[in-house]
Image (cartoon, rainbow, N blue to C red):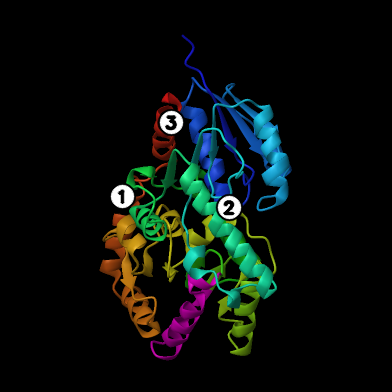
Amino acid sequence: MDNKKTIGIDARFYGEAGPGRYAKNIVNSLEKIDQINRYIVFLRKAGFEQYTPSNPNFVKVLADYKWYTFDEQIRFLISIYKQKIDLLYVPHFNIPVLYVGKLVTAIPDIIMHTFSTEEGTTLPPLYFKFKKFVYKVVVAWAVIRSKKVIVPSNTVKEDFLKVFPFARAEKFAIAYEGIDPDFSKSPSETETVMAKYEISKPFLLYVGSMYKHKNVETLIEAYKILKTRFGYNGHLVLIGKKDHFSNTLFEKIDQEGLRSDIIMPGQKWHVTDNEVVAFRKEAQMYVFPSLKEGFSLTPLEGMCHGLAAVISDIPCHREIYGNCVQYFDPNNVEHVADKVYELLVNTALKETLIQKGLELTKKYSWRTTAQLTLEIFTEALKN
């Protein structure tokens, strides 16, 4: 009896940040562990060019349909049906709502339910409200339709159960994420990277988007206290892409005369993965003030290079990081500054956290995530 099934993976985010890293790592890890099933990997043009299957059971198919559009709901749906798959896996919330076959989703968080505000958007107010309404409908339908919804933490599972009380707890499966191999490699020519961006040590580091819930403005205020009250003479380096949110922060920094102290390389350059690793290797510590996260990978990515982390005291961080970091109240600027300063002067504590962090990185891996995902596929395909 042939047990081979055909599984479709919506990997159209492949090569992008955020959900694209999830898609890339889960596809690459499934290749290594599943020698039985056949996979159809749907990709947009950029991902199609980047991805080269290493497992003969994995076949890439061009599906250059932009996410969050009618194209993905109609033309992409037709592409899926043409492949005659047994199960569709969507590692995001944006499922083709008219798909009637077996479905498994992986949704990293539902932060948009609580932190998506009109204040932080460039869209017209009515269009923004319509878009948010559609988002909520699609997420709810994904929960209803999926055989399983894979989430990266208990915190996210609890969020889902609060927002969607009709959902059964058994619907959700927890599969922790891991460090992208591109971020675990030893950096090359760190001095060249520092010179390119005109950054000298010491410096505090933040890596990520500048969305409202990331709370970067509070970090900037805490940095000002570190300079004025505690005499800190290092830089604050904020790494993220240039967009509406980063432009707002950049203007604030400029207005307060801090352009020479707070550096945002992404405003002028595209910072490569290798350069991000170099920053992590050279930074004094990692500071992450986010108000809400689903898993929170960036502190972990720094830990594998011996970077101690000072991060917000939120449920997700307590679950993932335990006692391996220094915590602060993200709503209290004074507390942020105090806890960062404490780690700056307490070298024994810093070294303890570095060693705990290095050990913690061994706990999370994409291979484990892929193994749990494959088990969910197998169970879903039984019926």
Label for residue 359? 1
Give the amino acid at mark 1: Glu
Q: Position of residue 119 (x, y in %)?
A: 59, 78
The correct choice, above or below, for 122 with respect to 166 in the image is below
* The label number, if any, that marks residue 380 in the structure image: 3
Is 71 positioned to the left or the right of 356 in the image?
right
Q: Which residue is at a point 47% across and 84% down the rendered structure image?
A: 221
Q: Which residue is mark 2?
A: 274
| Magenta segment includes 373 | no
Q: At 55% from the left edge and 33% from the top edge, which residue is drawn? A: 101
Question: What's the residue at 44%, 90% (across, down)?
Answer: 228
Q: Is 158 rendered above or below residue 25?
A: below
Give the residue type at disc 3: Ala
Query: How would you rate the neighbour count of disc 3 (Cα within 10 Å): few for under 14, some for 14-19, many for 20 or more?
Result: some
Q: CA distance from mark 1 to mark 3?
A: 34 Å
- The answer for how far apart the CA atoms under marks 2 and 3 are is 38 Å
Q: Is residue 54 above or below residue 291?
A: above
> Which amino acid lies under the numbered mark 2 shown in the image of this protein?
Asn
Real-space Cα distance between discs 2 and 1? 23 Å
